[in-house]
Image (tube, rainbow, N blue to C red):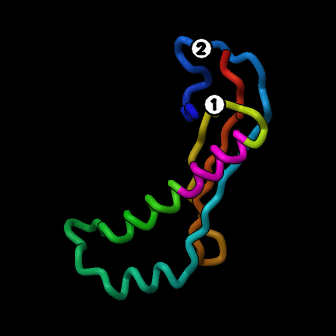
Amino acid sequence: MIVTTTPSVEGYQIADYKGIVVGEAILGANVFRDLFAGITDIIGGRSGAYEQELGKAREIALAELEQRAADRGANAVVGVDLDYEVVNNMLMVSASGTAVVLG
């Protein structure tokens, strides 16, 4: 499946629109506490462990987005936007876009 932040895919035409799809992943407060309690890899203000957890959450959100698009019969998602929000001491990563059929 093609997933892109652009509104179209070069070399393809959009044959059908299947609607907006969203994927989410939420990291609970315990994840942050556990990460910060054991962080030993902070160099220059960056935490590799924290970035790794955010990467996992992003991958989960994008995989969920792709699955929901596939469930609608799409073979691509265009206009993808990634958002990071803090909700009640939890971090939510959401990915949204338009599921389409490329022809």
The secondary structure type at the circle numbered 1 is strand
Q: Give the overall secondary structure of the magenta segment.
A: helix
Left or right of 50? Residue 5 is right
Q: Name the residue under label 1.
A: 76
Q: Is residue 13 above or below residue 55?
A: above
Q: Name the residue under label 2.
A: 12
Left or right of 38? Residue 18 is right
Q: What stretch is highlighted in magenta?
A: 60-70
Q: Is residue 8 above or below residue 81?
A: above
Cα distance in 3D space between marks 1 and 2: 11 Å
Res. 6 image quadrant: top right
Lower sequence index among marks 1 and 2: 2
Residue 54 position, x and y percent, is: 46, 63
Amino acid of disc 1: Ala
Res. 36 image quadrant: bottom left
Res. 24 image quadrant: bottom right
User: Are there few (<14), some (14-19), or many (20+) residues within 10 Å of tag 2?
Assistant: few
Q: Which quadrant of the rendered structure holds the N terminus?
A: top right
Amino acid of disc 2: Tyr
Q: Are marks 1 and 2 in contact (CB under 8 Å)?
A: yes
Q: Which residue is drawn at 56% across and 35% down?
A: 3
